[in-house]
């Protein structure tokens, strides 16, 4: 189910359906409160829809997380849901590299530099060998 949600997030992001990105992100947050992937893509969707105050609040929740490191990539039979979501959203060819890159840009604009660096690393991890990261924000 986690992979399906991340795949939907990717599909809706790639097609520019920001309303559905918001719906998927909020659905993930209903099941996994404070999930870093859902918060960041929610923040990005809100930002791109012009809801800057709401976007800032979502990104502020990311920056306030006590675990300032991204979840690990260790696979176990009983890994926490947030770790599984992060791993799925940062796998190569996840379709979210551009989103992660844009998240890094917005986080940086809001002054959340450490989470921005982590988002940029997620962008690098999630791109395929032939993908380039975008150079201009939407």
Image (tube, rainbow, N blue to C red):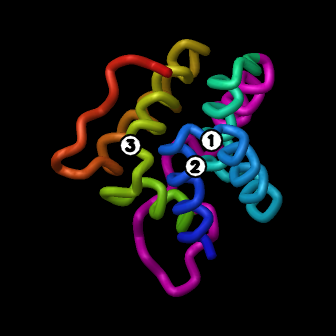
- Mark 3 sits on what residue? 97
- Mark 1 sits on what residue? 17
Question: Which residue is at a point 35% across and 50% down the rendered structure image?
Answer: 126
Task: State the separation of the CA atoms marked 1 and 3.
Answer: 16 Å
Task: State the separation of the CA atoms marked 3 and 2.
Answer: 14 Å
Upstream in sequence: badge 3 or badge 2: 2
In this view, 108 is above or below 15:
above
Task: State the separation of the CA atoms marked 1 and 2.
Answer: 5 Å
Upstream in sequence: badge 1 or badge 2: 2
Q: Secondary structure at mark 2?
A: helix
In this view, 55 is above or below 52:
below
Within 10 Å of disc 3 (Cα), the crowding (few <14, some 14-19, many 20+) is many
Question: Which residue is at a point 63% across and 69% down the rendered structure image?
Answer: 81
Question: Which residue is at a point 76% across and 54% down the rendered structure image?
Answer: 29
- Mark 2 sits on what residue? 12
Q: Position of residue 77 (x, y in %)?
A: 51, 86
Task: Find out whether the residues at labels 1 and 2 contact each other: C-beta distance under 8 Å.
Answer: yes
Which residues lie in the magenta part?
Answer: 53-82
Front-lying residue, 50 or 59: 50
Identify the image quadrant of residue 60.
top right
């Amino acid at each position: 189910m986690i992979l399906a949600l991340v795949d939907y997030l990717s599909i809706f992001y790639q097609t520019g359906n920001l309303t559905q990105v918001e719906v998927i992100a909020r659905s993930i947050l209903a099941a996994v409160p404070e999930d870093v992937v859902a918060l960041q893509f929610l923040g990005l969707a809100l930002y791109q829809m012009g809801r800057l105050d709401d976007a800032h609040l979502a990104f502020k929740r990311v920056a306030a997380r006590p675990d300032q490191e991204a979840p690990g990539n260790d696979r176990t039979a009983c890994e926490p849901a947030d770790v599984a979501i992060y791993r799925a959203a940062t796998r190569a060819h996840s379709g979210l590299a551009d989103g992660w890159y844009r998240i890094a840009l917005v986080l940086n604009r809001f002054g959340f530099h450490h989470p921005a660096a982590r988002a940029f690393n997620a962008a690098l991890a999630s791109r395929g060998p032939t993908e380039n990261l975008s150079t201009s924000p939407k």
